[in-house]
Structure formats: C-alpha cells, structure tokens
Image (cartoon, rainbow, N blue to C red):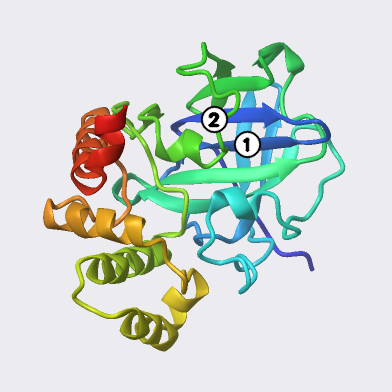
Amino acid sequence: MSESFKLFRPTSGRLMIRETTDAFALVGVLHFPPEFEIKEAASYMLMMLGDHIEVISNVIDDGLPDSMVGNGIGYAIQAQCWRSTGAAGTLTVRFFKAFPESNGWVVFGPSMLPIVSMDHFNRSHAWLDVSAGKFFGIQAPFDAVGEAIASTLTSYAVWPDVEGDLYAVPAIESTWRPVYLRHALLLAGLGAGEISLDDFREAIREDREVFQIRQLSPDMNYARYLARLRDRGGVIEIGVRSAADLDRADLLAKEVIREVMPEEFAAA
C-alpha cells in the first residue's frame, strides 16, 4: 500500500523565481500551519498550479548529501541533489529554518520546467506573494538581476514574517550557523594576534564541522578586519535581520574597514 500523504497550503509568504538560460530557480519564505512538521533540508514536492500553492507532506529524501551540507543555498540549488518532475508547476524544494516560532521557512529549489506563467516575469524574475494557499504577482521589491541567488535572501530585508514585517533571512541550515560563527571567531583571533597561524590551522583540523568550511590559508587583511569587527560586536551568528539591522551592520563594516585599511581610503 502506498504511503498516505497530506497537502499543506502555506498561510503566507513571498517567492522569487529566476529564469536562467536552461532552468528556473525558486527562493523565498513560506509560513505553514503548525501541524505541518517540516524536516529541515529534506526535499518535498511543491505544486504551483493555477493560482494555488501546496506542499506534499511526504519527504523525498532526508537532507542534503554530506558533501553539500553547510555550503548554503547558492551551492545546493545548482548541485545534483534534486529529483526532477515531469509537469510544469511542480518541483522539489528544501526548507531552512527562518521563523521557527511561526513555522516559517526559507524555501528553495530548481526546476527544468516553468514553475508559473511567464506573464509573471519581468527582467527574468517573477515576484509572488502568498496568502491563504494562493499566490499572486507583485512588483519587484528590488532589482535582482545580477545578484547571487543567496544574496537575494541575505542582503535585502524584503521577506515577511507571519505578521508581515520584512527581514533578510539566512541561506544556510540552522545547524550550520553556529559553525560559521566559530570559523569567523577563529579568524578574528588570528587577526588579533591571539593565536598563531599554526594554532589556527590546528583548531580547524580538530573541529570536524569547521574543517568542512575551512580556510586554511586565510587572507590576513580579512582576519584583521574580523578582529576589529568582533571587538565592536559585529561578529554574530547568522540570523534574520531587519532593514535597520542591515544598515547598522553595513555602517559598522565601513567604519572597521577604514580603521584596518586607512591608506586605501586616504588615497581615494
């Protein structure tokens, strides 16, 4: 007997679909009813037929392959880890945690077939809002042409929480966000002269997860930048960020760069 399944309709959200030369890529944020228990990074079937959007509850696989975990959406969406579908408007997607308190998730996936009507597209992108299990086209909140697919999530506060407030959202699995912080803090320690390069490399080799995203030959200018940024409270775990958070982080980064490399700014 085949395994039973349920269809879950997102209660709200926002999606962006990018058309490339031979495929489509979908990213965005979706909020679901609390009874839909999503397994992070596992793949599911998403259906966008007519103006309805639904997800089949059954998992297709248990997560990204070991060689791909921790590398983020930009890498995963191009990798050979997706089951193809045979019908336009259907694709496999994966979810990363974004707003766990409201069952809100970053969603992403590729498709070789059109996902929605090409009438929604402008400059190779379609922007869609989701409400009560239906989607509809909206004006682009920013021009995504030329942006890395992950940057559309992490660098722009255009993705709604369940209340409709807008945030930038992470593009890596929640379990790997502390790993990236550990790596950044090791680099900061190196840049501050608190550990030697040999100690830095040894610490990375001893941390299996950090070793997977390692930088064994670090850029010392970047390490010194991270050291100053850490001392100013700017090295933190990846999470959702409001427009004000993004502005503060950008201002702090510029101030620290001026401190670390003043001669470049003086020459400019």
Position above or below: 112 against 159: below
Q: Which residue is depicted at the point 27% across and 28% down? A: 243
Q: Which residue is depicted at the point 51% across and 74% down? A: 212
Give the image location of residue 259, x and y in percent: 18, 44
Q: Nearer the viewer, residue 85 or 242?
A: 242
Q: CA distance from mark 2 to mark 1?
A: 7 Å
Q: Nearer the viewer, residue 215 or 51?
A: 215
Q: How many marks?
A: 2
Position above or below: 212 against 28: below
Tell me: 88 left or right of 268.
Answer: right
* Residue 46 placement: quadrant: top right
Name the disc covering residue 15, or none.
2
Can residue 6 be seen in this snapshot? no
Name the disc covering residue 140, or none.
none
* Residue 188 placement: quadrant: bottom left
Secondary structure type for disc 2 = strand
Tell me: 75 left or right of 33.
Answer: right
Give the image location of residue 253, x and y in percent: 25, 41
Disc 2 to disc 1: CB gap under 8 Å: yes
The C terminus: image quadrant: top left
Secondary structure type for disc 1 = strand
Disc 1 crowd, CA 10 A, few/some/many (<14, 14-19, 20+): many
The residue that label 1 is drawn on is: 26
Amino acid carrying mark 2 in the image: Leu
Amino acid carrying mark 1 in the image: Leu
* Residue 155 placement: quadrant: top left
Q: Nearer the viewer, residue 20 or 28?
A: 20
